[in-house]
Image (tube, rainbow, N blue to C red):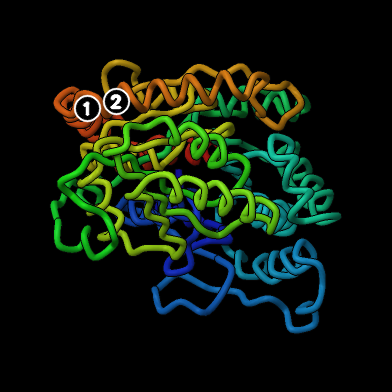
Amino acid sequence: MLACMRIDVLSKEYPPEIYGGAGVHVAELVRALRSVDGVDTRVHCFGSERAEEGTTGYADPQELVDANAAVRTLGVDLEMVGGCAGTDLVHSHTWYANMAGHLAKLLHGVPHVVTAHSLEPMRPWKAEQLGGGYAVSSWVERTAYDAADAVIAVSAAMRDDVLRSYPAVDPARVHVVHNGIDTDDWKPVANPQRVRELGLDPDRPSVIFVGRITRQKGLPLFLRAAAQLPPEVQLVLCAGAPDTREIEAEVRALVDGLAAERDGVVWIAEMLPRHDVVALLTAATVFACPSIYEPLGIVNLEAMACETAVVATATGGIPEVVVHGETGWLVPIDQAADGTGTPIEPERYVADLAAALVDAVSDPDRARERGLAGRRRAQESFSWPAIAEQTMDVYRSLLES
């Protein structure tokens, strides 16, 4: 075993430039790894230079500023490869950084670990957003996964998806290490004044959604279900970064329709700082996760850590986090097998989701009990130190073999 192990983590997202769950995962994992004795953890990420020691940001190559987004991504990946010289192992996150990890493996002769946060074959709607770039991202991901020395899936459901999507991958190389949550950063903090400033009445029941406006998050389905909520229940949408103009227009029309029929519809499109999200989660009666594709769902852990009960789709890795009848409600869904996750009977799913939401807000004391149970579960089963140690076990298995 190496006296001092150098690990290079490759990611598109890294603080302060984070917009999704994968970026949160990388930031927290790096922080936990850097607390492990004998491990030198370095980060290579997209974007501006970082002041943080051991962290390097890489801007888009000037020569590619007008290129397709997928080509610009590959340009950044090529820049990152050189920065990995001298490492013992590279660990890439999402297709954006997978090619950098794959090429670093080949160039420097080191193991490459990939974490599966999501899979391109499971998100065919990205063709709407990326055009031909989706074919490029799909090729990158397949190439990296097929050649990786180890794949870390963030849930058992994600492991199944990896093996189904990439049958050339040896099942023995695919390990399950869940996402985690920092329950010191994410904990209930009552701030009724700030909640009012954000447009919510903390004395009324509310349902909150936090997520990007993308097909996988199921926001249009949720908005249709929300129309059946009792009139006194507020609806809070922390939703931005739309994938396409089409889905943004669809969501806007649904929100406008709801706002015309009821009060208490609050849409916050900008990305809020964590303390504001915590305040809103703490004030909410229930958190809604209507995703039709969710490898695990860090947002559910964040809500649970804030003692907020969860109503979520029983898909992907969500049932590994949310316990039906204990920490929240799971909504059944029958999904198309074409990779889109689209409900086979969307109206039935909307009706079931609406029924679960109505049930959740109908008994605030019961919702509160499930919220308390959710925080206990987050603390006991999803701590970052434990997840870092499981990740280290994967590294050690490769470096000691």
- Up the image or down, 51 lies above or below 7; here it is below
At 43% from the left and 69% from the top, the residue drawn is 16
Q: Residue at x 58, y 33 (%)?
A: 293
Residue 160, given in percent of the width and then of the height, sits at 62, 22
Residue 240 visible in the picture? yes
Residue 109 visible in this rendered orientation of the protein: no
Around disc 1, counting alpha carbons within 10 Å, would you say few (fewer than 14), some (14 to 19), or many (20 or more)?
A: many
Residue 113: x and y, percent?
A: 59, 43
Q: Residue 367 — which label?
A: 1
Q: Please say if the residues under marks 2 and 1 sit with CB atoms less than 8 Å apart.
A: yes
Residue type of the residue flagged with mark 2 = Ala
- The answer to whether residue 257 is above or below residue 372 is below
Q: For the residue labelled by badge 2, is the local secondary structure a helix, a strand or a loop?
A: helix
Residue 218 appears at what percent x and percent y? 56, 38
Write down the quadrant of residue 330 in the picture: top left
The secondary structure type at the circle numbered 1 is helix
Which quadrant of the figure contains the C terminus?
A: top right
Per the image, the residue denoted by label 2 is 360
Q: Mark 2 or mark 1, which has the lower sequence index?
A: 2
Q: Is residue 97 left or right of residue 282?
A: right
Q: Residue at x 60, y 74 (%)?
A: 58
Residue 130 % position (x, y): 77, 56
Q: Is residue 361 above or below residue 74?
A: above
